[in-house]
Image: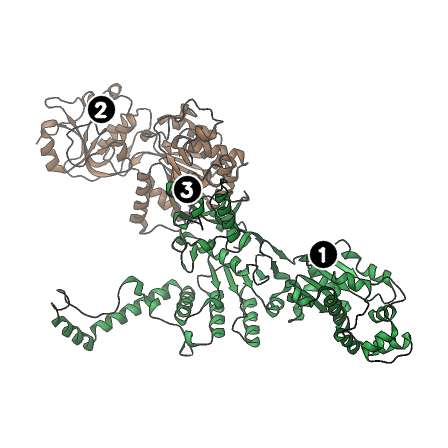
Chain colours: A brown, B green
Amino acid sequence: MQSNNRIILASAGSGKTTAIIEDAHASGSRCALVTYTIDNTTEIVEKTYVIKGFIPPNLTVSSWYTFLLRHFVRPYQNSLYRACRISEMAFVNQISAKGISAGDIGRYYFSRPGRIYSDKVSDFACKVIEKTGGLPIRRVKQIFDRLYVDESQDLAGYDLDLVELLMRSGVTVVLVGDPRQAVYSTHSARRNKQYGGPNIVRKFEEWRRSGLCTLENQNHSNRCTQAICDFADMLFPNLPKTVSLNRTVTGHDGVFAVERGQVSTYMQAFQPQTLRYSRASKDVPGHPINFRKAKGRTFERCLIFPHKMLEEFVLTGNLADAGKSLSSIYVACTRARQSTAFVIPDGKRPATIPLFRS
Amino acid sequence: MSIERVIVRNYRVLRSADVRLRHDLNVIVGDNESGKSTLLEAINLALRCQINRRPAAYELHPFLFNTECVAQYISALKGKEGTPPPEILIELYFADCDALAGLKGTNNSEGENQPGISLTIRLDDENYKHEYEDYIADPEAVTSVPVEYYEVVWQDFSGQRIKPRTMPVRSSLIDPSNISDTYAAGRYVVEFTREYLSDKEQVDLCLSYRKMRDAFRNDVCIARINAELAKEKGTVSDKALSVAMDMTARAGWESAVLPHLDEIPITLAGKGEQSSVKIKLALKAQKAAEIVMVEEPENHLSHSNLNRLLAHMSENASGKQLIVATHSTFVLNKLGVECVLLFNGQTGISINQLSADTANYFKRLPGHDTLRMILAKRTILVEGPSDELIVQKAFKAKHGTLPLEAGIEVISVYSLAFKRFLEIARALTLDTRVVTDNDERPDAVKEKYKEFENDRNIRICFSTDKSLFTLEAHLVALNDLANMNKVLGASCETKENLLSHMLVNKTECALMIFESKEPIALPQYIEDAIQ
């Protein structure tokens, strides 16, 4: 059977979100647009207003968690959990309730009555589906014809099982994502660990091979200039190269290194958005945004205050020096349309990229 | 979209009710105190989360709670028993359809996988745990439900909280009797008018109204008055005083516009006219209410107007679910006996088992005695006026009151119609006795009513004595000739003569027996009927 499910792997700045909105609107069918973080949800809503001027009535935008709670967890929660309404989530960064057996539903899934651990939401959802013989899936089919998942590289653990169930259900599932930007794995669950981070592509491949979906690559960037694309592609040498469609020339385009002493001059000259790895980076001017938080955003120019490993990488051009946070670095590098600059210590000279001189 | 089932717990007079509704027309009948109106009110509350047209949370008061349930709670507290605080629950179960799938789930008291809405009024124990603890610390001081610590939880069966704007089911409740003052009546009609208008028309109306207000401000006279007032600056206030039309949000067109009928403000039209306009508007409204509830449409209407309104309702209700509470047999028969829902405060019993034939029989005979029967505690069906009088007499002799005073109806039905009535009695499990002559063939009578043999609520009373074919024959056989002559003011010489006299003058004789103070022996089957 020919499947309508699609997975689209797209580079940063390819206009995925815009494409989703257009596609969903044009389909005329009842669509759920789901994305991983609340920031991304806001982004989709704002973009929709920019593109359409309004939210078309056939679109429902929500975050992945809201979607799960609303359609998979709560409607049939009493098949597993009757204590009280599951009203909220306890956000956790690691595996919750360690050492508690999965049979102890009240403690394994909940931090307190009605408060479900964020890493267990999709697990719980899958259990409800199993227990009720698929009622949540049937219900969702009555409500939506299509499900778009933006930033689908962030799906992990039981999320993947759930998406697979949906793909098999007859709801048309469209996953859009960039494995290079797998900065959040929704949780550090043990389930489907082999597909964590950029390895999620392996799962996508498996689905394609079993005929569940088609898989396409979109390797163009509307946003970044070619030099920025090339630099960012160095982080993932095994993935297809990105082609820039940005032909704008401003006189300061591409990737640069800026000596610490030149930062204020550079700031004055170009008013870049400053980016930092985390709050630990001190003395960052402007209104800095953390790398991971910047995902999905677009700026004219960025000035990046690297952490130690990124600084090493900028200086040597050696991927081995870049450490493990490749996805975060990739996100940071690909925010700017025209120029991405890295702050380096005074007196150092980078091996591959030009130095900014005032 | 329609409501399939309503469950109500502890709301006003409804301690525990569970009613199934038809998807099209429902005519709810029941005793005065059975809670018909309360049932409509409860449905409306769950659909809108409003009490008296205001958000329910602001309108909570202890009397919303079922008194029996509150009494139990208080006595449990006084008896030092642990008891949960009273809770009101109203659940509406809708027929499953894609449009309502968002409301679907099993978060309801029955655990059914259905679209639905539940409204709970319960202790907010997250925020008022300690206050509540203090409240019940001294049980002797507890006299009612502490509604100050209560919350209204309005959610669908999927567990999602409902916002009024996202509520996919539209409804109207039309309650003509509830409109006491003309102001409220006017507002009420405006609300319906507003729902009748399209969005565009509403915006236009709103704009015109605003222009009119602006024109007022710019009027020469008003400008002069304001200039005068401005001179008073400093005397009443440091700021400039002026008059203008109220431009605040609450002063929308709704507060200044009143519907007119033939140029007469609707509030000055007759109440009957007002309510029929409201009902018609609700049925035709643009933002069509899928569910329309009407409380006693017969109020304030003349017979012929009611007839027209009912015809209109039947014609325009297609695709909507109509729930009508009524006291009128006329309304009941006109809208269709098959739609009746006998509500006894706990459950609605419907006549859906009624054969089409019988349903038609009652539909053709408006003003028939169906409602009398449905509302009675017990009905005794008899063959004609003479039997009716004798049964009345027998009842009074035995119980000291007339049947009606005891809530028992004695209805004369021509014998052919007995079975029609019995069909209703069976469908609604109405306590019913039939008093019939055996016409010399008791076996035939037994055979005729064989199908009702196993209905415990139905009892066929007749004589098994073949030789005594009518009630009169029994009376003659059981009583002394002289005594009967005295009662009937007759002078018959033989019992045969007496019987012929009685058969010729059935009703007159029955009336004399009824009015006589002499004791008269009555046949056993009559005694059976009045026990």
**Residue corresponding to mark 2:** A310
Q: Are marks 3 and 1 on the same chain?
A: yes
Whether the residues at callouts 3 and 2 have beta carbons within 8 Å, the answer is no
Q: Are marks 2 and 1 on the same chain?
A: no
Q: Is residue B90 visible?
A: no
B499 lies above or below A356: below
Numbered badge on residue B137: 3
Q: Which chain is mark 3 on?
A: B
Q: Where in the figure is residue B499, as x and y percent of width and height?
A: 87, 75
* SS at mark 3 in the image: loop
Quarter of the image for residue A328 reads top left
* SS at mark 1 in the image: loop
Numbered badge on residue B457: 1
Rounded to the nearest whole Å, what is the CA distance between mark 2 and mark 1?
A: 89 Å
Quadrant of image for the C terminus of chain B: bottom right
| Label 1 packing within 10 angstroms: few (<14), some (14-19), many (20+) | some
Q: Residue furthest top?
A: A320
Q: Where in the figure is residue B170, as x and y percent of width and height?
A: 46, 57
Q: Which chain is mark 2 on?
A: A
* SS at mark 2 in the image: helix
Quarter of the image for residue B326 reads bottom right
Rounded to the nearest whole Å, what is the CA distance between mark 3 and mark 1?
A: 50 Å
Q: Amino acid at mark 2?
A: Leu
Q: Nearer the viewer, residue B447 or B492?
A: B492
Q: Are marks 3 and 2 on the same chain?
A: no
